[in-house]
Image: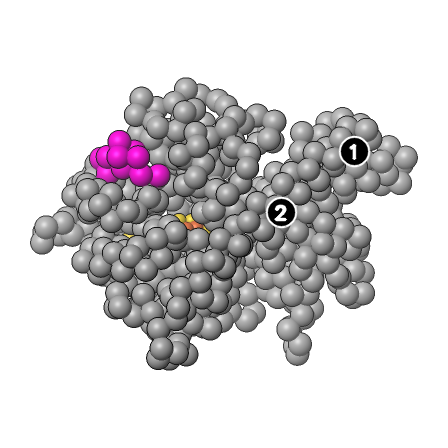
Amino acid sequence: MTKGPLPLADGLPPAANCRFGAGCADGDGLQPHETERPLPPEIAAKVQDHPCYSEQAHHHFARMHVAVAPACNIQCHYCNRKFDCAAESRPGVVSERLTPEQALRKVMAVAQAVPALSVVGIAGPGDALASAEATFRTCALVARALPDVKLCLSTNGLALPEHVDAIVAAGVQHVTVTVNMIDPEVGERIYPWISLRGKRYRGREASRILSERQLEGIARLAEKGVLCKVNSVLIPGVNDGHLPEVNRAVRALGAFLHNVMPLLSAPEYGTHYGLRGQRGPTAAELEAVQEACGGARIMRHCRQCRADAVGLLGEDRGPEFALARLSVQPAADAAPDRAAHRTVVDRRREQSAEARARALRGVAGVGVGALRIRVAVATRGEGQVNEHFGHAREFQVYEASGEGARLVGVRRVAQYCVGGDGEEDALEGVVRALSDCVAVLASRIGRCPQERLREAGIEPVQEHAFAWIEEAVLAHLGSYADRVARGEVAHAPRPEPVPLTPEPREVREAS
Ligand code: CLF
Ligand code: SF4
């Protein structure tokens, strides 16, 4: 367990029914450690090792999804579920469907092999509450077998009001509700139909009913002390201008966190939007809406997981735990390993916080003034700059200033170094995806990519290999500011990155 309290942002007053002390306020753009105050201990205990609810935790803790919920009770224009697909990395896709008993076998196998496991989630491939029997049976089995692992559900919210009591009884402490609109006029462009108690509704009426039930469900979850995260899919031209209103509404009802995610609409996904040419947002558009939603706590590290994802967010361990590969002997629990991992993480967090404080003092010494830069980081977890440039499937982009370093987003890229053809294309993709960054920090960067990055005005930096991320980012800010002051570097606005989520060259499985 972390020793220090987790922060809660200062800002707007809390919602009337908010149990989180300062409500969901955030978004002043300043650094958490400077502007936030501690979360109440009972909330801190719920989020400190949940990789989605805490950006800090996502460096250290893993989640797994069990695909026990194939059915859905609504249709979204961005959805096309695939039940036997290993090639697409997006929600709604799985390699195999599981019964609750199979899910438990898989959970036990993962728990034995992955001491970082802290959360078991049910996120489809359909709606967790449209397959409520399987969902709650799975929760009961997992809760009995692994009481120290958190349970998490994701739902579209249509069936939420009548399941809140069952959620509480099952010991589920985290529920994600996807809310893309509160205005049925917007909703009718996202949802062609919903199905409720055997009746199908269409058009605005469908969206009105969906929205009412989502909001009622969120309010009831907050009343019961269940942490509720709202996911919203940003669909340019459909709900981009509307999401700040959604943010205000869900925050007022007590939602803890708001995750604004980009629409994924590649034509090969076969969704209505994909086939109609509806584009997703650029990184700049996504950030603009996240900032406009700045009144609530905003999640910026979502990886838009598959419904059978396993591992750290962004990691790719699902295929290791396919049913056919599991031992016929049930795996024994490894609770002591998880406890030991938590102790190690506590120590890492303390070391990282000390290093960040040191780095901030260093930056103050240099005097960076109003300088604000973006730096990309290659990491495979543990909060360190510890990934080779050529192995990275994503880069975490930090904004650094005299106030600190904050994550502004994660850019997925095609892995550069997989051997064979296509490396140049992959490298160009990385350069485009990181064009707003002045530097990329990695544990190692090959000579070819170094040259290309320099040509593009992105400094390749290896000297912070295995340093804590924020410490490294701030150290780079100090060095950059120093060079700007001496006239060695001309600081100028950087071009916008495009595209936001290119398809990786080699997608096997992801979350
Ligand atoms: Fe899974 Fe969702 Fe729970 Fe996380 S994912 S059910 S809250 S344990 Fe996380 Fe994945 Fe984003 Fe979801 S990164 S898609 S927000
Ligand atoms: Fe697909 Fe989820 Fe929408 Fe159902 S609620 S149609 S599973 S995205």
One can see residue 458 in this view? no
Using the rendered view, name the quadrant where residue 350 is placed: top right
Residue lying at 52% horizontally and 32% vertically, measured from the top left: 5
Extreme residue toward the top, this view: 13
Disc 1 marks which amino acid? Answer: Gly
Comparing labels 1 and 2, the label whose residue is closer to the camera: 2
Residue lying at 68% horizontally and 65% vertically, measured from the top left: 390
Q: Indicate yes or no whether the magenta region holds residue 222.
A: yes
Decide if residue 165 is on the left or right side of residue 82: left
- Dot 1 or dot 2: first in sequence order is 2
Camera-nearest residue between 134 and 154: 134
Disc 2 marks which amino acid? Answer: Arg
Tag of residue 362? 1
Q: Of helix, strand and loop, which one carries label 1?
A: helix
Residue lying at 33% horizontally and 69% vertically, measured from the top left: 105
Range of magenta residues: 215-227
Which quadrant of the figure contains the C terminus?
bottom left
Camera-nearest residue between 37 and 250: 37
Using the rendered view, name the quadrant where residue 56 is placed: top right
